[in-house]
Amino acid sequence: MIELRHFQHFIAVVNSKGIRQAARDIHLSPSSLTRSIQFLEEYYGATLLQRHGKQMILTPHGEQVFKEFKGILQGVESIKPKLAQLDSLDHGSLRVGLNPTVADTLLPKIGTRFITEYPRVGITTVIGSVKRLMDLMADGELDLMIGLDGVLEKERNIEVISLLETEALWWVRKDHPLLGKEEVGLDDFVNYPLLSQYLPPVYEEYLYELCKQDGVQLDSIQQAHQCDDYRALYLMAIESDAILLAHAFISNNDYFTDKLCQLHTRQQMPNAQFSVALPIQPIPSPLARRYVEILQEETDLMIAHSAEAFLTYTNEQN
């Protein structure tokens, strides 16, 4: 059976241009080295080296074998530093998938902190729909991603780590007709277009149940526009009579409360869970685990800040 030592022996002879010098260089007897070269020639069924004066030179077949062997040995030698990088937090690369909602809120703080702590680590952030990100991770093109539990829990071969639980709130522009009503229900939504991110299953199911309770056909609620870009939805809401459904951790931003008001309804929407997903195979690197730790730490800080900001907003409204 051909072994790595045969590759090393052959390359040593080519570099030294002779058996005796190569044997001295690799601390092997000339007879053992000769047998190793003969084994390769028998294995490949071709003459790889021929004598030219006092030197050994490559035949055309030997040229091809030398090129292949050299590439293989270079690949073998590159494995060790690559493995060291996997265990190190100082070097390497990380590929992260975020949907636009999470990217808009979390990426500036998390990205800034990560590149400050680990300036030599290269990070590629892909922003897209949860479905696209799941496809990329399944193809081995992402190390981790953030998505909604309702989507992630349907997938296999991933590890899911809870990150953030958030409620959904209804928002309208500050002079919206519904703000004058004492009690608002889903039956009042029939006359107004609805704006939202792509709804997770938990919201769709709950909306369906609420519509049944209020005697409203879900189809009668006008789903005017769905997209992952909350800033675009926000701009549509302040310029129209549309009702915007937004996650609380997004809508507590100043650009929401400056131009929009929360619309209180008879029924509250259920909470949704954002989670981090990592592939089970290959095992996540220390860099990926550290990124998740930073995500969790920054999310906790954001939740505390959002709760304080929302309390201030609520007191101002009252």
Image (spheres, rainbow, N blue to C red):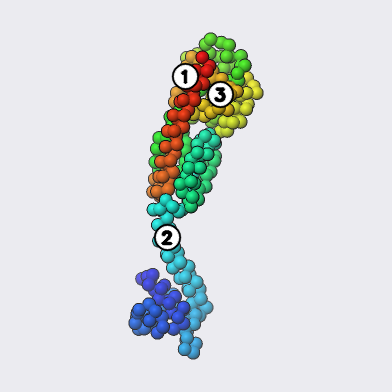
Q: Position of residue 3 (x, y in %)?
A: 37, 70
- Give the SS element for disc 3: helix
Q: Earlier in the sequence, mark 1 or mark 2?
A: 2
Circles 1, 2 touching at the beta carbon (< 8 Å): no
Task: Please give the name of the residue rendered at 56% of the width and 33% of the height, measured from the top-left corner.
Answer: 228
The residues bearing labels 2 and 3 have C-alpha atoms spaced at a distance of 51 Å
Give me the C-alpha separation between circle 1 and circle 2. 54 Å
Disc sitting over residue 257 in the figure: 3
Q: Which residue lies at the image location 46% right of the left edge and 25% below the top edge?
A: 308
Of the numbered discs in the image, which one, if any, rests on residue 48? Answer: none
Q: Answer yes or no: is residue 180 visible.
A: yes
- What x and y, as percent, mark residue 21? 41, 83
Q: Mark 3 or mark 1: which is in front?
A: 3
Residue at (38, 77) in percent of width and height: 26
Q: CA distance from mark 3 to mark 1?
A: 19 Å
Q: Amino acid at mark 2?
A: Pro
Of labels 1 and 2, the one closer to you = 2
Question: Does label 2 or label 3 sit earlier along the sequence?
Answer: 2
Q: Please, which residue is most extreme toward the top here?
A: 182
Residue occupied by mark 1: 268
According to the picture, the residue beneath numbered tag 2 turns out to be 81
Query: 306 or 234: which is nearer to us?
Result: 306
Amino acid at dot 3: Thr
Q: In what element is the residue under mark 2?
A: helix
Q: Earlier in the sequence, mark 3 or mark 1?
A: 3
Q: Position of residue 230 (x, y in %)?
A: 57, 30
Q: Residues within 10 Å of mark 1 (few under 14, many from 20)?
A: few
Which of the 4 image quadrants contains residue 173?
top right
